[in-house]
Image (spheres, grey):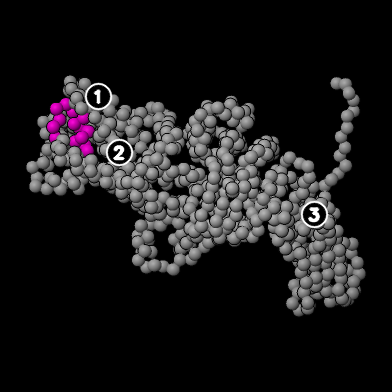
Amino acid sequence: MNLIQQKLKEIGSDWELLVILAKRDISVRYKQTILGLSWAIVKPVATMLVFLFAYKQVAKIQDISGYPIQLVIFSGILFWNYFANSLQAISNSILVNSNLISKVYFPRLIICFSSIAVSLVDFLVGLAVYLILALSLHQDISGYIFLLPVALFITSLFALGFGLIFASFSVKYRDVQQIIPLIVQYGFFATPIVYTTKQLSEKSWFLWYNILNPLAGMVEMFRACLISQYDLLTAQNLSISVLASVLVFILGIIIFDKREDSFVDYL
Amino acid sequence: MHIIEVDSVSKKYELSANKGAVSLKNGIKNLLTKEEKEIFWAVNDVSFALNRGDKLGIVGSNGAGKSTLLKILSKITKPTTGAIHVRGKVASLLEVGTGFHPELTGRENIFLNGAILGMTKHEIKSQFDEIVDFAGEQISRFLDTPVKRYSSGMYVRLGFAISAHLNPEILIVDEVLAVGDADFQKKSLGKMREVAANDKTILFVSHNLTAVANLCNKTLHLEKGRVKQFGETGEVLSNYMAALQTNRLEQSFDSFDSAPGSQQIRLKRATLIPELLEGQTYLDIRNKINVSIEFWNTEPNQQLNVSLHLFASTGECIFNVGTPPGQFGVGVVQATLEIPGHFLNDGTYHISFMVVKDKSIVLYNFEEVFNFEIADFREDTTWYGKWPGYVRPVFPFPIRQLSDSI
């Protein structure tokens, strides 16, 4: 716990640098406004359209677990893109910024934390699209939307935890980087992104599924905050997700702390 | 109370077949097989201490551990053993424009780079105009242009301008002075002097010994990672230069059989002796240099002359002089050359010479007989940039006022 406290303090003391690095990433991303924005809008919309086509036209499914199919899929994709993009950005943050790390000292964690910024902005853009989509379908927005930041926070901890572990190892073992796209690709289907936990909840292994994939609870957290009357978030998978996020985050910090001193030697 | 204490600091690198980053598979293999690794101490048992206001020059040949030491001092990398204690805010300038992002504008990069170097937003804001002013008029016109469109000169000027406005108690600088055109170098060095004049502590790595001599009161000479000497600048530098110049300044061969050359001509002895002034320990641009060449000739009645070439380190021939031809018999022949002082510029040179028969037939070409270095020397100057040119003659060049009216 002391270590976590000390690390967070380090970040706090260099808060301005974190903000400016985050700003750098965002303004580079959105420098070409059309491209940056459209990327944040087109990607989730296109993914949703593909699945809508598969479900409605091919499989003749009209709704998922009784909720509007568009909203279930789009909220799932919003969540997944946020998690996957953050994970990827954090994992690569040390290597991408190797020129900085080998020339200046600052708490290394800053670069990992600031790398979430772009995913966060993309998420907010996607959220606006979601709200427009919900309104155009004449659907209410969940009354729990004010809890969305909490859901984001929990997801961020999880992404940070894993991201820090990958970042720590990828400096020395470059091929670790190649694992992440695989996780993102298979994780998308292994997690209830384009379906819900309801379709799994009858299974005998459902509890184990939630423990092995805490992302399942997290995506339901997002949906509970976005879709009106959404009742698939149980106390059980909520607590599993929170617990897993905190544990993974602590583990990530511990591993990062062990390895950060040697980063420069391998850059 | 010392502001910096370095206590037997060492840094070890393991040189294995897969140096640096490896693949996961190889990493596991290495763990399992415990392969023998070659160990290399980049910095080895270095200790020194500085007081507030000291300006330390760090000198040494390439690979002496200067950069590694700077990285340890600026906390970028941890020493393997030993400890450093630093009391005060440190800013390190290991390159100009660290973290500049090509897509961002000059203005955005000032804030980014400033923050990376440890300035607060407030500090940058309050100095913003000065920074732009220092960087020059060209930059101020292109402040809102992405720096990827800057020329490399503009890039460097902007980078240096930001660094020059840092306000740490301890400043660590690596070679950044060797940037920009002569005008900007002058400005940068002026700024360094200004910084040096106040109470700041500076650690400065440079190959520019003139700058070290003029800016630093203490000097650390590193050799193969170890401290060769640490102390007052004058003393350390003169030993350093003297050690550097133990080049091939004399070559002599005891017997004809072992000497280089042809059947007819063999080198007996060649010396290059500078006439040092009193108290001088190494050769600089002021000194006269005497070159003497002795060779064996085995044929009677030969018309011979010696032709000498002096080359710069870049390979260009600076001059070629020849002795007048003469008639020589069997025995030893000597040629002597006097290169005047205040003629060659500072730099590294080498000399080759050939023995020529009948003004046209080259009997033998003795290549790179001497390799020597001429140090710079300047008095009462505020400019330490590299003096251009291969020669540096002192020609009479008077200047006077012709009239009082315009």
Q: Judge if badges 2 and 3 mark residues of a common chain.
A: no
Residue projecting furthest to the right = B327
Horizontal side, residue B11 vs residue A94: left or right: right
Q: Nearer the viewer, residue B15 or B70?
A: B70
Q: Is residue A222 magenta?
A: yes
C-beta proximity under 8 Å, tags 1 and 2: no
Which residue is identified by label 2? A156
Please report the residue visible at 20 percent of the width from the left and 48 percent of the height from the top.
A212
Horizontal side, residue B100 vs residue A72: left or right: right
Instruction: Inspect the image, locate mark 3, and give the three-letter code of the amino acid beneath it.
Output: Phe
The kind of secondary structure element at disc 2 is helix
Relative height, residue A41 to residue B255 (above, below): above
Q: Position of residue B188 (x, y in %)?
A: 65, 38
Please report the residue visible at 42 percent of the width from the left and 33 percent of the height from the top.
A19
Location of the C terminus of chain B by quadrant is: top right
Q: Position of residue B107 (x, y in %)?
A: 52, 29
Count numbered badges in the picture: 3
Which residue is identified by label 1? A131
Instruction: Inspect the image, locate mark 2, and give the three-letter code of the amino acid beneath it.
Output: Ser
The kind of secondary structure element at disc 1 is helix
Residue stretch in magenta: A218-232
Q: Nearer the viewer, residue B231 or A147?
A: B231
Instruction: Inspect the image, locate mark 1, and give the three-letter code of the amino acid beneath it.
Output: Leu
Please report the residue visible at 72 percent of the width from the left and 55 percent of the height from the top.
B235
Crowd class of label 1 (few under 14; some 14 to 19; many from 20; radius 10 Å): some
Crowd class of label 3 (few under 14; some 14 to 19; many from 20; radius 10 Å): few
Which residue is identified by label 3? B319
